[in-house]
Image (cartoon, grey):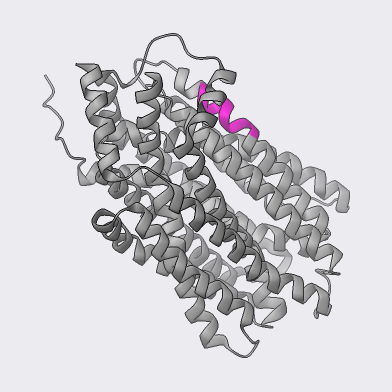
Amino acid sequence: MTSPLPTKLTLAEKLAYGAGDLGPAMTANLLVFFQLYFFTKIGIPAGLAGSVLMIGKIWDAVNDPIVGVLSDRTRSEKWGRRYPWMLGGAIPFGITFVLQWVKPDLDAMGLFWFYVVMGVLFNTAYTAVNLPYTALTPEMTQDYNERTSLNGFRFTFSIGGSLLSILLMKFVTGVVGETNQINYLVTSVIVSILSVASIIWCVFGTKRRTFSHQDESLINEEEELPIAQQFKLAFSNRPFLYVIGIYLCSWLALQIMASVILFFVRDYMLLSSDIANNLVLAVQGTALIALSFWSWFSGRYGKKNAYFAGMAIWLVAQIGLFMLKPDQVILMYFLGSLAGLGVSTAYLIPWSMLPDVIDLDELNTGKRREGFFYAFMVLLQKIGLATGLFAVGQALEKAGYNGALTVQPAAAIEAIRWSMGPLPTAFLILGVILAYLYPITQAYHEEILLKLAERKR
């Protein structure tokens, strides 16, 4: 007879849960910071390169609700709802990531189609692994503040993985150099191995906890709602729409900044790739260190106030980067670190809000639909990101950016600066407005849980 689980999550369970985001974070970080630049350097025009990213992201968005609903409906006595997807997708996830950094001997259009196919395959495997993983959060704990703590562990591994991927890139580049982009391929192989191992750790380290909560009837065995009806209910859930908007705006700002940071450092600041990597480390390192602070701040002052404070700091940093002069290298590092303080809340707060929205949905509908809500949130986010990355690539190409040139045209430099400053700033301001309107406080959430408990009794 097994002993009962402690009410609170153990440190080992939190660490195992956090490890599940290590691989997705490392792969996503390398793709967002280096892939657009990599494409332009191997002979794909910037506009076409942006189209590769857009197609991959759109497919990634389309398959999210499919996997989300299917994982909600998956029934396995041994592995539950989420783990069959994570285990089955782990190896394909690692292999297809590596294939995105292989350079076949093809012309520009041939390369375009090759990377489109690789992107579609990778994003399919990514969704199979990552979406069921994110849906574990409300299945592990129902405590309002412990969910923030759990997401703190998740994003410690997430940002830590981002830092590790950059450090690996720096190390590999120092050993093999940048000739023929071999550094990207070697780094991708190392990251792939670490990613698969971390997913397996997550599955075996959290399985006992999530199965315990499933025994508490968090899985509803009644007939599932049709997908169209689920979409209708999601759109009628006002707090959920606010969370989507908050997440979309903050991540659009981050992804746009991340996709142009290498262009900004190399072509505007006229500095080396190594300096660009150091700037990324400054942003992500500060975000990692700040996670524990924002987790404490959120528990004391509320999730909304934590988000407001983080965004205010981030806005100052983005405006400063836009006004930066090419010789202000020290100030560039300072502003990057300042931005990291805000980036930390973009990781932590929206994802700790979503489980509370799912509890409200259960109160309204009588069903637990974690997979659907996580999928729907990520679907809209990825469509937005696809549009943003496509727009950046098109803007660079129309401004005359050419990866073969040592010095870029003035119009291309201005496009890079605007993508680094005013464009992310506009999305951050919109996210703050939506966070102000978000209605679920800690008191409101406690009321939801009381009503759910009464219903189950």
Q: Is residue 103 visible?
A: no
Which quadrant is home to the N terminus?
A: top left
Task: Specify whether 317 is left or right of 269.
Answer: left
* Residue closer to the observer: 79 or 328: 328
> Per the image, is 68 magenta?
yes
Predominant secondary structure in magenta? helix
Which quadrant is home to the C terminus?
A: top left
Which of the 4 quarters of the picture holds residue 367?
A: top left
**As drawn, 438 above or below 264:** above
Residue, x 69% and y 74% (percent of image)?
417
Q: Position of residue 52 (x, y in %)?
A: 75, 48
* Residue closer to the observer: 246 or 26: 246
Which of the 4 quarters of the picture holds residue 94?
A: top right
> Per the image, is 144 magenta?
no
* Residue closer to the observer: 152 or 193: 152
Toward the bottom, the furthest residue is 327
Residue, x 49% and y 58% (percent of image)?
432
Q: Position of residue 110 (x, y in %)?
A: 86, 47
**As drawn, 45 above or below 318:** above
Which of the 4 quarters of the picture holds residue 120?
A: top right
The residue range painted magenta reads 62-69
Q: Position of residue 344 (x, y in %)?
A: 42, 61
Residue, x 65% and y 43% (percent of image)?
383
**As drawn, 176 above or below 161:** below
Q: Is residue 34 visible?
A: yes
Q: Position of residue 444 (x, y in %)?
A: 29, 39
Task: Specify whether 322 is left or right of 116.
Answer: left
